[in-house]
Amino acid sequence: MIIGIDASRAASGQRTGTEAYATFLIRALIPAAAERGHTLRLYFNQPPPEGLIPEQDGVERVVIPLSRLWTHARLGHELRRRPPDVFFTPAHVIPVGIRCPAVATVHDLGYEHFPEAHPRRQLAYLRWSTRHNARAGRRVIVDSQATRDDLIKFYGTAPAKIAVVYPGRDPDLKRVDDPAIIAAALARVGIQSPYLLYLGTLQPRKNLVRLVEAFVASGLYNEGYALVLAGKSGWLAEPLLAAVRALPPAVRVHIHLPGYIGEAEKAALLSGATALVFPSLYEGFGFPVLEAQTSGTPVLCSNSSSLPEVAGDGALLVDPLDTAALSLAMRRLASDNALREALIARGYGNLARFTWAKAARQTLSVLESAANGIAPSPGLD
């Protein structure tokens, strides 16, 4: 069987959650597909970086030069001209008008919970693309039970059509134990220890204005702590930036916005942090939680959407709408070493649930069922 995959997100220069998902899942699918005698045909909109997806038997790379309407015009034309047995898009949308069986991963429906946090045109596109994926795909993969429930609630998707496949953790991310390496990385981004770390895009649903307010209320800055909000600015980031600018200079100096953090700096920042603070209002999965647990860093995150499902018992959970509770939780993590050590140990234990090899096996089962017109098995392992 030939499995076509939209690999365009895997070739992206700045890796965020969906790009990481596409990259690591495709890498894991290569050996899993080979074991079952399948060929992967990977479609790129630009030549992939060297070493990203190694050339090998059973893998065909098709580079279709980038254009404005790449997905629906260029990729769609290629899929109609030379259709695979099944097509899979791990991080985007199924091209309109293709005739081969298709499967899409829907990562989250945060825009349905917080439509006001999205520009009007973007909101319209997100709703259209999710509805299209749910209707055009023979199967739909989701990252969590929370997203499955949302897809049923907001789009009326048949439950039997949806498969929950947990992503794996970042196989390239390792804990940094060398203090000199951590110090050098902190110096490059202008940060000093101790600090609490948020990792992710700066956008309204991440609840960062409330996080800043909770940090200020905690008074931890008086004890030398910093709050680091690491990530690129997303849509409507200005309220956060304005909230930081409005703080007194003596407080503002303890809040850092270093922008997008590369992979090497990310590993060092995670390893050196007192805790990851991730009070997002909505997540379809929440990769930073697993990244922190991999790095041996305690996690403080929301008790809503998919985050309790992902964090397991390896996180301190808090109501993301309760500023006082968030502030108190930050103080607890800064002062309670026993709590920190317990969360670290439970976080390591939680990681066993999330491997890309397992995700690849489950994804292949869904793709095979879609190609053959067979309903997926309730147990995908």
Image (spheres, rainbow, N blue to C red):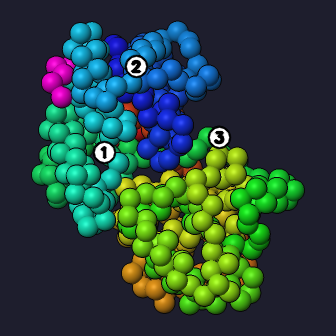
Residue at numbered disc 1 = 106
Does residue 237 lie above or below 368 as drawn? below
Which amino acid does the dot numbered 1 rest on? Val
* Mark 3 or mark 2, earlier in chain: 2
Which amino acid does the dot numbered 3 rest on? Asp
The number of numbered discs placed on residues in the rendered structure image is: 3
* Mark 1 or mark 2, earlier in chain: 2
Q: CA distance from mark 3 to mark 2?
A: 29 Å
Question: In the visual, does 377 lie left or right of 263?
Answer: left
| CB within 8 Å, label 1 to label 3 | no
Task: Judge whether residue 99 is colored magenta.
Answer: yes
Which amino acid does the dot numbered 2 rest on? Pro
Residue at numbered disc 2 = 65
- What mark, if any, has residue 172 been given in the picture? 3
Task: Judge whether residue 155 is colored magenta.
Answer: no
Question: In the visual, does 105 lie left or right of 99?
Answer: right
54 and 306: which one is in front? 54
